[in-house]
Amino acid sequence: MAAKSTDEKTNVMRLLEQKKIPYQKHVYTHIPSTNGREIAGILGQDPDRVFKTLVTQGKSGNYYVFVIPVCEELNLKKAAKAVSEKAISMIPQKQLLPLTGYIHGGCSPIGMKKLFPTILHETALLYDTICFSGGKIGYQVEVAPDQLIGMIGADSADVCD
């Protein structure tokens, strides 16, 4: 069910190449209402190695990005503690594009309009590579987690339920 790979590159891929970070591109045909677990299945990937990007706002007004496995839920208390906030909440979906430059379903931790403090769920470090959005619906990139951390200055923590 995965679509044929095309030569099209997203900004995420261009940024990875610019930093000389090796990656593998995965392209799939988007089916509306497909969830992360289903996308992992389409790509033949272990769902524990496929991550989603969530954008939040702290009580202070600062924004934070959390990259967590697609089958997990963000624990807002653990997430707030990880970024030294009293509380955080998910941003409304309508704020995602103006804030990050990405739409829902295509949000990547790489290439946002501004580099926000980012926390990668600690399980990512168990794998040689993880998959996450390539910055456009239907595109995923597979990158070594330590390379991602180095590129965007992320930290890791247990932020899931």
Image (tube, rainbow, N blue to C red):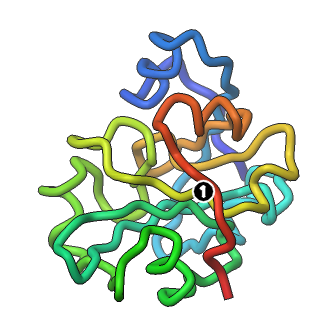
- Which quadrant of the view contains residue 83? bottom left
Three-letter residue code for mark 1? Leu
Residue appearing at x 65%, y 29% in the figure: 147
The quadrant of the image that shows the C terminus is: bottom right
Provide residue 146's location: percent of width, then percent of height: 70, 35
Instruction: Judge whether 15 appears above or below 65 on screen.
Output: above
Left or right: 94 as drawn, with respect to 134: left
Left or right: 126 as drawn, with respect to 115: right
Residue appearing at x 44%, y 51% in the figure: 137
Provide residue 38's location: percent of width, then percent of height: 70, 70
Instruction: Judge whether 140 appears above or below 25 on screen.
Output: below
Provide residue 79's location: percent of width, then percent of height: 51, 77
Left or right: 45 as drawn, with respect to 160: right
Provide residue 154's location: percent of width, then percent of height: 52, 46
32, 158: nearer the viewer? 158
Q: Secondary structure at mark 1?
A: strand
Instruction: Spot the residue most to the left.
Output: 98
Instruction: Judge whether 60 appears above or below 66 on screen.
Output: below
Residue wearing tag 1:
120
Residue appearing at x 28%, y 51% in the figure: 102
